[in-house]
Image: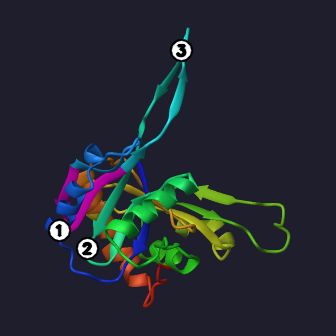
Amino acid sequence: MASFIIVKVPTKKLDPRAIQMQVNTLSAFKSKQEYRQGTLPDTFRHSDDCVYFQAGFEYHQELEGLEETYHVKPFNKFQIVFVGDSFIAVERVQSEDDLEWIRHFLEDNFIQDVVLEPIPFDERVLRKIAEANPDVFEIEHAPARKGMESVDKLRYTGRGVTQSKVYQDYGDEPLTKIKVRLNEVTEGVTLAFYKNGKLTIFRETDPDKLTKVLKIIVDRIVAPYVIQTSYQRRLL
């Protein structure tokens, strides 16, 4: 399982060779800082009009042993995928500090002058996904109708849920999540789209296969429904 957020960037022809050179230059193995940070060049991949690599940073951690405390420097690493000419998929992280590190790392070294903002999958996009993919098997709502004020979440799972009676009764409630299988193009890989912008790819962790799935998602789902003509500029 792998989770990502997707950001749109000003269109620029994908140049795998230039990105690879920058990845090599930014290698964490070359870092002179006390806590190293940078890319992991051995993770670089180019396939399906995507460029994949990992980047991250060391941090301090104390481990309690039987007789003493050990000080170690684990490496916190994140997956980054340039998808075609206009999108970047970034591993979804729980920590806001980690997200800020990824954002600044990309803005400083790959996408200068532009603030990278995740694309939310708003209700319009979630409904488009449901309409375009017949193999929907989980839907989640945040009910808003009168009489359901105490219900925080309504979720139902099963085959053909969009043809079910429960969907007929509650399908017009605000959507927060939809889970689908894209069998015809991804050999049964399961995808979950969340209103907050998180995308989870189940049953797939291999970088080469992840890039294939991400390219399909961007081409068939994100690009047709995302409209963004301006970008917030960074303050120097």
Q: Residues within 10 Å of mark 2 (few under 14, many from 20)?
A: many
Residue at label 2? 84
Direction from residue 47 to residue 203 in the image, left or right: right
Instruction: Find residue 13 and report its image quarter.
Output: bottom left
Q: Which residues are magenta?
A: 43-55
Instruction: Find residue 18 and report its image quarter.
Output: bottom left
- Residue located 18% across and 72% down the image: 15
Q: Position of residue 233 (x, y in %)?
A: 47, 83
Amino acid type assigned to the residue bearing label 3 in the image: Gly
Q: Which is nearer the eye, 148 or 162? A: 148
Precedes in sequence: disc 3 or disc 2: 3
Q: Position of residue 216 (x, y in %)?
A: 30, 69
Amino acid type assigned to the residue bearing label 1 in the image: Ala
Instruction: Find residue 12 and report its image quarter.
Output: bottom left
Q: Is 86 situated above or below 194? A: below
Precedes in sequence: disc 1 or disc 3: 1
Q: Are marks 1 and 3 in contact (CB under 8 Å)?
A: no
Direction from residue 152 to residue 222 in the image, left or right: left
Q: Secondary structure at mark 1?
A: helix
- Residue located 55% across and 8% down the image: 67
Q: Are marks 1 and 2 in contact (CB under 8 Å)?
A: no
Precedes in sequence: disc 1 or disc 2: 1
Residue 9: assigned label: none
Residue 18: assigned label: 1
Q: Is residue 107 visible?
A: yes
Residue at label 3? 65
Q: Does the magenta-highlighted stretch encompass residue 83?
A: no
Q: Which is nearer the eye, 50 or 135? A: 50
